[in-house]
Image (spheres, rainbow, N blue to C red):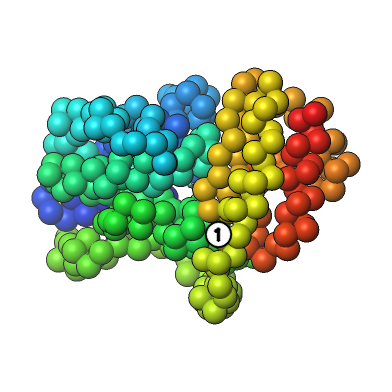
Amino acid sequence: MEVALKVAIQYWFNLGKPEKNRFLTIRGGYHGDIFAAMSVCDPVNGMHHLFKAVLRQQFFADVPHVSFDAPWNGADIKSFADQLEAHHTEIAAAIFEPVVQGAGGMWFYHPEYVRQAKALCEQYDVLLILDEIATGFGRTGRMFACEYAGISPDILCLGKALTGGMLSLAATLTTRRVSQAFAQGEAGVLMHGPTFMANPLACAVAIESIAILEDSDWPGQVATIAHQLKTELEPCRSHPAVKDVRVLGAIGVVELHEPVDMAQIQPRLVEAGAWLRPFGRLVYTMPPYGIEPKELRVVTEAILRSLA
Ligand SMILES: *Cc1c(COP(=O)(O)O)cnc(C)c1O
């Protein structure tokens, strides 16, 4: 995330527009815990109150309300469009998680939002950064969640499943148009280079992990998991404490009306054989694609029993 934000700022610097150095994001997002990333996390659920004095003020659009499979409503993108119209001369890039807002609320919103956001960014000459750190590598049923919208960003952030979760590595990808602006810029390169950047061991693991993924039937596995999660989590819906049950790809979410009592629910889950980490009003699971149906059954049963 830090690299993506720096790329966007230095890109506009290279093009002689240093005033374009702020970001537009959508509420309910999560982009990590480092300073630059914190500034674009949700201002209420994020850590803004704690670090307010040192965080850059960014621009925020409303959370998309239209869910993934509901009929699209054009009013949903209005707040994003309004922010761009008012502030685009200061904005380097828009940044958000496409289709699935993860740690900010496990919310699945409409791909048309993503498609229109991309068109608006082009219209107002603002870069688009997509954070697919959680959604990348098949999790939502597509290799990348932005495929649901049929668009690709100017800058793409990957992490987590990049190494199959085995080593710490992230990747920041750009289009040629963005990278070429660096070759011609004053510095000639991106001004970023931590000691362990492109760590060879982590890169080797990432290459192998991607090869394993590509050799597997991940679309079939994810579809099978989605079907099982839908079937087996559905009974949760009738529980009075439950507000919503939703599944997209290999992500299953049970949203409650009230925040989960962690001290109460976690021992019950463990007792039922599953290690899950609920947060806020959410009990959720993102199982590995290789999970067996009977193993996934243990997880869904644990969720059901822990609610009871
Ligand atoms: C986990 C996560 C991050 C942060 O990644 P780190 O490697 O922990 O900094 C950013 N964005 C999303 C969507 C995430 O899920």
In this view, 91 is above or below 217: above
Residue at (25, 64) in percent of width and height: 175
Left or right of residue 305: residue 152? left
The image shows residue 169, relative to residue 48, as above or below, that is: below
Q: Label 1, secondary structure: give it.
A: helix
Observer-nearest residue: 88 or 99?
A: 99
* Of 296 and 271, the residue lying toward us: 296
Any part of residue 192 in sight = no
User: Tag 1: residue type?
Assistant: Ala
Placement of 291 over or under 266, stated as above or below: below
Mark 1: C-beta under 8 Å from nearest atom of ligand 1: no
Nearer-the-camera pick, 253 or 85: 253
Circle 1 is placed at which residue position? 223
Number of dots carrying numbers: 1
Q: Residue 8 location in percent, x, y?
A: 27, 51
Residue at 52% over, 66% down: 219
The image quadrant of residue 89 is top left
Residue 114 pos. (x, y %): 31, 45
Q: Residue 232, image x and y in percent?
A: 69, 45
Rendered residue at 39%/36% (across/down):
70
x, y percentage for residue 133? 48, 53
Q: Is residue 230 above or below residue 88?
A: below
Going 80% across and 29% down the picture, which residue do you hit? 308
- Mark 1 crowdedness (10 Å alpha carbons): few <14, some 14-19, many ≥20: some
Which residue is farthest right? 271
Image check: 111 left or right of 9? right
Q: Is residue 186 visible?
A: yes
